[in-house]
Image: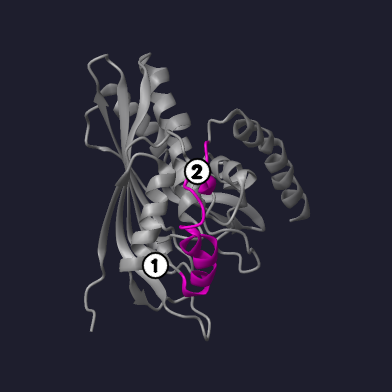
């Protein structure tokens, strides 16, 4: 009888390479476990603790095709991580409000706060409110080698009773400097639970761009230094493929490894055609959010 959850280690140069190797390693070596979200008849999930390191997060091939989405979805998620859906969060004391419990960006930018109804009106509440993004950028700019540049999401007063509490738990940063004076932003990301097939690739892609466009760019703006992305270490306490998704993962990836080249399984994010698609998707995402806002 298996008594220990496997701990798997992956290190690759690019995001697409690391993602694919991690999926294959999980499929081969993961444990079979039930989840609280299983429906009757669902097979067990494939699960492990995963430590996945991407040495050059922005290098190509960056995009793997084996995730449930396309270029527009990547753009939408990258925008979500930067806050465009923060207003979708519900009033926690309104049982009729079915919007989201939180957004990652909301927890990072306004940690400690939430929304609630008072006298029929929505208002911001909380014991305190901290912009962790601003604090992290400030710390890294002042002292790039600090070990204190960390952001968290977990709010025990809310999340122990939340049906779907935050999977992302923390982001930790530190900067290295090379012989040419270029600074390299290193990042550790910790998830308590991470859907390897249904969400992980978009998670990693989104936070790679968040690190580039928000954290690294923020430090560079404050210091006037060149700040690039160094390695990203992605740790998931539970990195899993749900039982309901195993057949789809086999069909789309595992059973096609011998018949497709790696180039056919990936996109180069910096290819002009992909860049054009990615940039043009922004207007469609903005329209989609506006339509949702108007209908809700």
Q: Residue 197 placed where, x, y %?
A: 48, 60
| Residue 182 painted magenta | no
Q: Residue 290 placed where, x, y %?
A: 73, 44
Q: From the image, which quarter does the C terminus lie in?
A: bottom right
Compared across the picture, whether 127 is left or right of 230 comes to right
Residue assigned mark 2:
263
Q: Residue 45 placed where, x, y %?
A: 42, 73
Task: Tell me the number on the disc at residue 240.
Answer: none
Vertical comparison of 179 with 52: above or below? above
The local secondary structure at tag 1 comes to loop
Q: For residue 82, say whether it is visible.
A: yes
Measuring 28% from the left and 22% from the top, which residue is drawn there?
Answer: 142
The local secondary structure at tag 2 comes to helix
Residue assigned mark 1:
160
- Badge 1 crowding class, 10 Å Cα cut-off, few under 14, some 14 to 19, many 20 or more, is few
What residue span does the magenta drawing correspond to? 242-268
Vertical comparison of 123 with 136: above or below? below
């Amino acid at each position: 009888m298996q008594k220990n959850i496997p701990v798997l280690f992956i290190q690759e140069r690019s995001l697409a390479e690391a993602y694919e190797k991690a999926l294959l390693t999980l499929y081969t070596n993961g444990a079979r476990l039930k989840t609280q979200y299983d429906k009757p008849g669902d097979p067990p999930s494939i699960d492990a603790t995963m430590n996945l390191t991407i040495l050059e997060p922005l290098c190509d091939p960056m995009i793997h095709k084996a995730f449930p989405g396309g270029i527009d979805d990547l753009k939408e998620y990258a925008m979500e991580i930067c806050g465009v859906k923060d207003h979708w969060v519900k009033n926690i004391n309104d049982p009729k409000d079915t919007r989201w419990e939180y957004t990652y960006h909301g927890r990072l930018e306004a940690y400690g706060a939430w929304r609630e109804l008072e006298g029929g009106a929505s208002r911001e509440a909380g014991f305190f409110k901290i912009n962790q993004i601003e604090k992290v950028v400030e710390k890294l700019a002042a002292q790039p080698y600090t070990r204190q540049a960390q952001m968290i999401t977990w709010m025990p007063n809310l999340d122990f009773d939340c049906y779907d509490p935050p999977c992302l738990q923390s982001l930790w940063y530190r900067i290295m400097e090379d012989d040419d004076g270029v600074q390299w932003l290193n990042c550790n990301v910790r998830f308590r639970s991470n859907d390897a097939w249904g969400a992980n690739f978009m998670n990693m892609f989104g936070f790679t761009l968040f690190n580039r466009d928000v954290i690294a760019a923020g430090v560079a703006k404050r210091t006037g230094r060149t700040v690039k992305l160094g390695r990203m270490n992605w740790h998931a306490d539970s990195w899993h493929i749900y039982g309901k998704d195993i057949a789809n993962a086999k069909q789309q990836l595992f059973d096609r490894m011998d018949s497709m080249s790696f180039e056919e399984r990936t996109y180069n994010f910096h290819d002009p055609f992909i860049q054009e698609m990615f940039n043009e998707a922004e207007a469609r995402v903005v329209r989609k959010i506006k339509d949702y806002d108007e209908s809700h």
